[in-house]
Amino acid sequence: MVPTEAYVILSMVLFAMGTLGVLLRRNAIIVFMSVELMLNASNLALVAFSRQWQGVDGQLFTFFVMTVAAAEVAVGLALIVAIFRTKQSINIDELHLMEG
Amino acid sequence: MTLEILLFMAVGAVTIATAAMMLLSNNAVHSALFLIVNFIGVAFLYLMLEAPFLALVQIAVYAGAIMVLFLFVIMLLGAEKTGAGAHLRRFRWMAPVAMVLALTFIITVGWALTQGDIDSVEPPAGAAQVRFVHAAPLPAQVAAPSDMMTPATEADTAAEGEEAATDEVATDEAATDEVVEEAPAEEVVEEVVPVIPAQNLPADRVFVLLVNGEVVDDSFVYGEETDFLPVEPGLAVISLRGTADGEDVVTTTLELTADTVQTAILAGDEAVSFYAVPQGETPGLTVFNAYAPLPALALGDLKGELFNDVRRILTVGADEVPFGTYTAPLSYPADFPNWVAYEPGRIDNLELIPDEASLRAVVLRVSEFLPEMRFGEDALIVLGAERRPDNELRPLAVRLDPRPVDQFGTAEAVGERLFTDYLLPFQLVAMLLLASMVGVIVITYRGDHTPKPSRSTRRKVARPLTSVITSQTGADLADHDAPQLPERAEQPSGD
């Protein structure tokens, strides 16, 4: 059996990569994808601990995280579409002026 | 290095590589496609982590729905290449800060992981799943129970009804001896069973069953079983309380091991106690002897010789089952099982119809309960006795279905918890999804478009054809004296 530690380390690496994507990429859609990557990394850790403790609760939390992520993606992409209509760009460096 | 570790390393490498490609790719469509591969890899890891349901949800929701939404938005906006140029970046100090942040995160969590030694932690012992079965044919509550049951009043009983009562007392004593003497010697019984003398039981014979001080069944009557209940492993304190008042409580104990599925059977006549029967690993038919009048029972198969005079019984592997014990899981034939339980060594007297005369020889036809069972199914049959209104005992069997084993991480196990313990969060998440859907519509709704000029068009069409010709040619074709439809009629009848 693969040790839980290996899964958690993999999850940690994926989470760090997601963080880098959020901080370094300028494309708002890529930033959103990086957020999804971070959520997935945390899900992986939850499922790994769920197996370690032989309890379904971790998997249920993963289920809820997935649901919330779906809602977040829908709203976030709608925001991106709305912003793109007004500014003709989704580069987040150009969105700091808070002007409509 | 096992195959599983190799697989983990391969899939882990794929997930990390695709995550890096997603970050580095200049084309947003390529990034989305790499992320899909990453999600599928994570779904594979879920499968390895005993979470098949989540693996499917991951593929359906993440790799399917969410990523399609991403790709759709990218295509819709034509935003594949935006934000690629690094020279446009305003915050040049961001990159080193982000790297330091990520490195700090990895070092901190990695140090905590290596120090924490997660894998040496044992999961906590799960609760034992126990159901309680009432199989003790106590005297009816109306007919003065202390007369029949108390050994001190034996003389009274004998005076009242000689043959039946003495017979019963004798067998009762044999049964009690069996409990005390035979139980420790039998291998399948794990501990000496604490016994409750029947006269100590509450008088009204309908009990309130308490486990560790909590009421689990408020009407625990003969022949009924409770659902499977999680009980803390260890020495469980089981109490029987009368329904009338909460005063007379009889308490006994039952040793329960963790992570087991057990059936606790209340059996006995003169003295009752709970006997724990674990649900076996191997499938088959487990037969528990709760028939108090005889010290032991044997199980045999009559085959097709029910109607012949030949009283030959094929043994089915349970030659002698003492009272309070149970057989190992027996496999039974699919063709024509004709099992009976009988008193060992009394095959000659075997009769198939129970009546008063042959009460001691004949016990029960187990086969009556077999046709309902499918071949290979697991079941527990409790051979007990039923007390008729005249206080006679009559054989009776109760068939109990096993507890379905819920596999860890399956949709059934996840769904059961989701709709019991996590019902409120589930509803809240549903409301969140609804709110986000409304929010998306509000955000993307364009309020500035003009209303469609559909009403005027419709009116034009609705106008009679003659007036259209009049307006184009100038000649008035309409016969104004002819009767007209009312002007407000919206649908012209024939044009």
Image (tube, grey):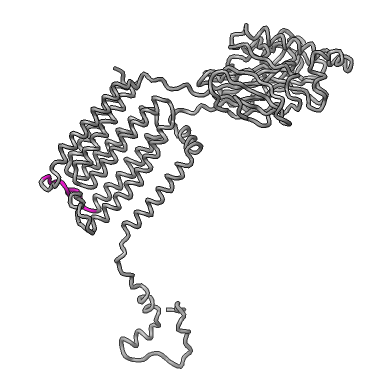
From this viewpoint, which residue is outermost toward the front?
B247
How many numbered discs, if any? 0
Q: Is residue B85 above or below residue B17?
A: below
| Percent of width and height locating residue B309 | 76, 14
In the image, taking residue A29 as reference, residue B204 lies left or right, namely right
| Percent of width and height locating residue A46 | 36, 31
| Percent of width and height locating residue A92 | 20, 49
Q: Is residue B45 above or below residue B305?
A: below
Q: Is residue B78 magenta?
A: yes
| Percent of width and height locating residue B38 | 27, 35
Q: Residue at (10%, 46%) from the top-left corner? A: B87
From this viewpoint, which residue is outermost toward the right?
B159
- Residue closest to the eye, B70 or A96: A96
Q: Is residue B221 visible?
A: no
Q: Which residues are magenta?
A: B77-86
- Residue closest to the eye, B149 or B469: B149
The quarter of the picture where residue B99 lies is top left
In the image, taking residue B178 as reference, residue B161 lies left or right, namely right
Please identify the dominant SS of the magenta region. Answer: loop
Q: Residue at (33%, 70%) from the top-left corner? A: B452
The quarter of the picture where residue B410 lies is top left
The quarter of the picture where residue B197 lies is top right
Q: Is residue B475 magenta?
A: no
Q: Residue at (39%, 24%) from the top-left corner? A: A52
Quarter of the image where the N terminus of chain B is located: top left
Q: Is residue B300 above or below residue B406?
A: above
Quarter of the image where the C terminus of chain B is located: bottom left
Q: Is residue B296 visible?
A: yes
Q: Residue at (63%, 13%) from the top-left corner? A: B316
From this viewpoint, which residue is outermost toward the bottom?
B481
- Residue closest to the eye, B15 or B209: B209
